[in-house]
Amino acid sequence: MPLVHLASRIIGTPLLIARPKLDVILSVLGSRIGLPEMELALPMPAPKIAGTALPTGIAVIPVVGTLVKRVMGIDAASGLTSYDEIGARLDAALADPQIAGILLDMDSPGGEAGGVFELATRIRAASQIKPVWAHANDAAYSAAYAIAAASERLTLSQTAGVGSIGVIALHVDQSVKDAKDGLNYTAIFAGGHKNDFSPHEALTPQATTALQTEVDRLYTIFTSQVAAMRGLDRDAICATEAGVYFGEHAVAAGLADAVMPLDQVLAEFTEALAAKRRLATLQATRNCAISSVHSNLENSMNDHETIEHLEPVGEQTDTPTDAAPSEDPPHTDGAPQPEATIRTPLAQPAANGRIEAQAIAELCLIAGQPQRTAEFLASGASEAQVRRALLEARADQPEITSRITADTGTGTTLRPEDSPVVAAVKKLTNNKE
């Protein structure tokens, strides 16, 4: 029964598979499903990851052999890998906290159309959670290329090929063989298309049109998805005419990103993940510093405002105690008194303090130590004290290989006007004015 089921999934149905591999499958199954015996071809090689040291934190998912939607009782020894299996391994890697990145190890001629586009969409969505790379080692054709193209980065080994972006459907007309064998098949059916694609007679024009229409539909989906995944124009994908591209030619056509061995891919992936972790740590540190600045400045501004509204205790006024009462009638209706014109001497220092807080934040940024902003503000250090402390810290460094300026860093990320710490200080001080 599995052979009958497998045959029905090969003959008369559109496939995303390289034509040479289709001939290999037919050579193996032909005599067992009523087709003429063909020369037996060697099976696909095993994945070439044996002997390669796998870095910690990278899950390697093999995408090897002929790809099918479901194995349906036919195990991996038959050279099949199912989309369901690949998807399950993808989900397991995403759920594993020890896994930081996913590498698809590709060595496949493609396979069934059913399920491949959904899997490609899942892979692209997964890359938003954890980086997903793919490496053609040594083949990523047709359906396999649809999967590989969904990754963030696609590399291939020197002998590898990618592409074959096309759709094929095969019909076998064995009516002549039937006649030689003395067999005559008569189909009794209802519904004009019920007997389409029968192997015991030639294809009718209507059956040919129906099959071509489905092939064209799948081809449109295939080329459109690859174009979107690779950031290319669909016309450029169609212009490949389902050709196979090797090495640097694949990179030049935009179908791959680089040519390198698997060991180098793993090394680059490891470094990329480490850089991502460093960036996340830096961002977390900056966010913590910004939060601390917000908290300290809020407390500082609130303290100043509270002091500003306090009446000075024991302070003598210039008005004698026996001075004549004011000509203005007293307020006896309980309405609030007009705001006093006498303000405490702390009002001006409070404004100066806001300006100084912003200057301290900028000094810390220029010195490459934005995380110390909260420390200095909490201690009540003056701008001069902060400048002296930063200079002393710089002098204590054993080696200074570059000058520290406002433009130090990448791009403009460390310029005072672009710093999130300085922006936080400005926002808080402006809100308090």
Image (tube, rainbow, N blue to C red):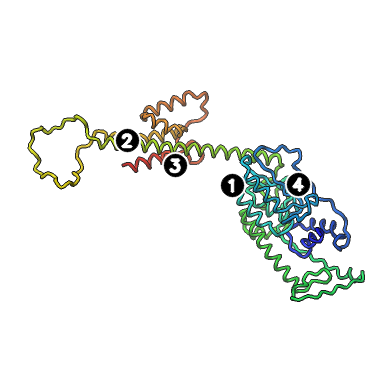
Q: Which mark is residue 129?
A: 1
Residue 294: x %, y % from top left: 40, 39
Seen from the viewer's position, the closer of residues 370 and 344 is: 344
Helix, strand or loop for disc 2: helix
Give the position of the C terminus as an image quadrant.
top left
Q: Does the CB distance between marks 1 and 4 fall below 8 Å?
A: no
- Amino acid type at mark 1: Ile
Helix, strand or loop for disc 3: helix
**Where is mark 3, residue-wise?**
418
Q: Does the CB distance between marks 3 and 1 fall below 8 Å?
A: no
**Where is mark 4, residue-wise?**
159
Q: Quadrant of residue 351?
A: top left
Q: Tag 3 or tag 2, which sits nearer the N-term? A: 2
Q: Look at discs 1 and 4 and give the one toward the viewer.
A: 1
Q: Tag 2 or tag 4, which sits nearer the N-term? A: 4
Q: Does the CB distance between marks 4 and 3 fall below 8 Å?
A: no
Q: Disc 1 to disc 4, how far (Cα)?
A: 31 Å
Residue 50 left/right relative to 88: right
